[in-house]
Amino acid sequence: MRTLNMIVLCAALMIMLTGCGGYFNKVEKNKVMVKKISEEQVTEEISYGDTLSLGTVNTLSINAVNKYFDKKFKEDDVKIDIRVVDQQNLRYLFENVEYGAAPQPEGNKSIVFDTQAMLKEVPSGLFYVDLGSVADFPSQYEYKYEYDLVLSAKDGKVLQIKEQINPQQVGIRQEKQQMNTREVIFTRESIEEVIDNGTRFVKEELGLTTVQPLSGKEMIRWNGSVVELFFKDEQNESVIASVFVDTHTNKIVGFNRGLMAVLSFFSY
């Protein structure tokens, strides 16, 4: 499930539990901070408050996809949709996670996080970005985004990037796994290889050297053939990263770090 959708689901649950509305400030296509912008403006140096300009967000998103997925996109090659979550709404979300109003996975009592420290990482909130190749868009009215990104609105740090998963393809893969391939693909050896690959990526690509995979059921979440592996800090037991791995190819297809890893962990 896409992280954006998971947060929306969390928000819906919180609204039902608390009666509060307006927690998630989803900005419609081509709007940022509820201010209308045109297709031409999205690449210009327009900013709102203490945030990066839209042009910078555009460039950073393209650079991140090129880096982590070995692409060579230029601005004219892609179509981008931007949404924003401000810090006030992030605070509301974290407080509900911390005090039990949001869904939490079984056995998570050993996992700790510091709400204030998380919020200090993103003083200006987050930009959610959907990015896709123009060549893959059936028409100007149909959008086929291929990558999800979340960037810090203040400094552009990439907190999440991943390939979007086609739900139909997930269903096909799940059916095949259930029928005749699960015992072949998901042996102990193959899982260990996936874990080793994910651990190496977190340490080498994200620079998080003092990590280890979570243990037991907390460590892995499945979405078809793609698994999300969670990692914690060896010293303070906090979730600091997760990596998405396609078990068919053993390739890394995305990651979360910092507060996005925490939100992903507590949003299942």
Image (spheres, helix red, strand yellow):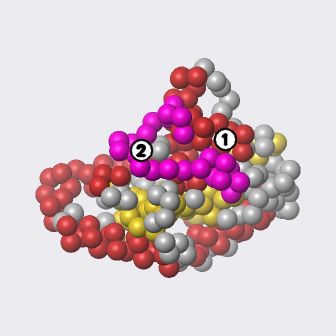
* Secondary element type, mark 1: helix
Of the residues shown, which amino acid type is indicated by label 1? Answer: Arg
The residue under label 2 is: 109
**Cα distance, mark 2 to mark 1?**
20 Å
Residue 4 higher or lower than 95, as above or below: below
At x 75%, y 52%, the residue is 123
Label 1: few (<14), some or many (≥20) within 10 Å?
A: some
The magenta stretch is 98-121
Instruction: Provide residue 95's location: percent of width, then percent of height.
Output: 60, 37
The residue under label 1 is: 91
Label 2: few (<14), some or many (≥20) within 10 Å?
A: few
**Of 112 and 249, the residue lying toward us:** 112
Number of the label disc, if any, that sits on residue 252? none
Please state if 185 lies on the left or on the right of 216 as rendered: left
**Of 67 and 210, the residue lying toward us:** 210
Residue 17 higher or lower than 268, as above or below: above
